Image: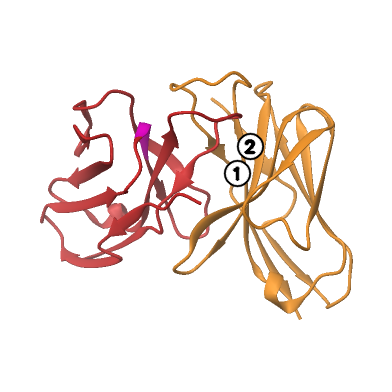
Chain colours: A orange, B red
Amino acid sequence: DVKVTQSSRYLVKRTGEKVFLECVQDMDHENMFWYRQDPGLGLRLIYFSYDVKMKEKGDIPEGYSVSREKKERFSLILESASTNQTSMYLCASSRTIAYSSTDTQYFGPGTRLTVL
Amino acid sequence: GQQLNQSPQSMFIQEGEDVSMNCTSSSIFNTWLWYKQDPGEGPVLLIALYKAGELTSNGRLTAQFGITRKDSFLNISASIPSDVGIYFCAARPLTGTASKLTFGTGTRLQVTL
């Protein structure tokens, strides 16, 4: 089974702090994704990565950056946390970089971040 | 970006009832997925649909990929308390990189005894 793990389930930070959210997958997947989930808005893509050191902006990248130094690990960075970044953050991975209609995304358990 | 309109937003049903939810879009997609998210957890894939008209079952769950490729529905038969959660549809457009998906806003299901 695919396993996607996230470093923290719950996190409380203060405004202005630098925040790191870590995600690790154990299935040698090429693609990794960071989403945020807010009530009524569904899942919105922040960034995704299709290879080591490769990244692309998603729909809401402002205020975030990412790092992928190793294939299995994808980090989301909030350079200066703000209260409007309080949310549930979900990491996902999928198998292939090639366009494949049978590829699916597997999710981690999520990190609920509160910024005070 | 592309939007998936998912309805209903929430449902309160009694144990044993059947449930139906759907997703529609003005765009064409070539894959439809249905996920369930338990409270405090990440979404888990329930059913994947890859061909227009495809009808697929997974236990008490049945999903269909619409003929027009612009919609999909999910049915749950004889609901039980553990069906509680948020159900998301997701779809992949005809072209794109890195398996990007578009998600619906979710249907929150609550089951009363």
**Identity, as a three-letter code, of the amino acid under mark 2:** Val
Q: Main secondary structure of the magenta part?
A: strand
* B32 is within the stretch colored magenta: yes
Count of marks overlaid on the render: 2
Query: Disc 1 sits on a residue from what chain?
Result: A
Q: Quadrant of residue A11?
A: bottom right
* Bounds of the magenta segment: B29-33
Label 1 neighbour load within 10 Å: few <14, some 14-19, many 20+: many
Vertical order, B38 against A100 (above or below): below
Disc 1 to disc 2, C-alpha distance: 5 Å
Q: Position of residue A105 (x, y in %)?
A: 53, 34
According to the picture, the residue beneath numbered tag 2 turns out to be A4
Q: Give yes or no for contact between labels 1 and 2 (Cβ–Cβ under 8 Å).
A: yes
Q: Residue at x 45, y 41 (%)?
A: B44
Which is nearer the N-term, disc 1 or disc 2? Answer: 2
> Element at badge 1?
loop
Q: Position of residue A108 (x, y in %)?
A: 60, 44
Quadrant assignment for the C terminus of chain B: bottom left
Query: Disc 2 sits on a residue from what chain?
Result: A
According to the picture, the residue beneath numbered tag 1 turns out to be A108
Does residue A55 appear to the left or right of A9 in the view shown?
right
Vertical order, A108 against A111 (above or below): above
Q: Residue at x 58, y 49 (%)?
A: A109
Out of B1 and A107, give the one closest to the viewer: B1
State the residue lying farthest toward the bottom. Answer: A116
Residue B113 shows up from this direction: no
**Identity, as a three-letter code, of the amino acid under mark 1:** Gly
Q: Position of residue B33 (x, y in %)?
A: 37, 37
Does residue A28 appear to the left or right of B47 in the view shown?
right
Q: Quadrant of residue B73?
A: top left
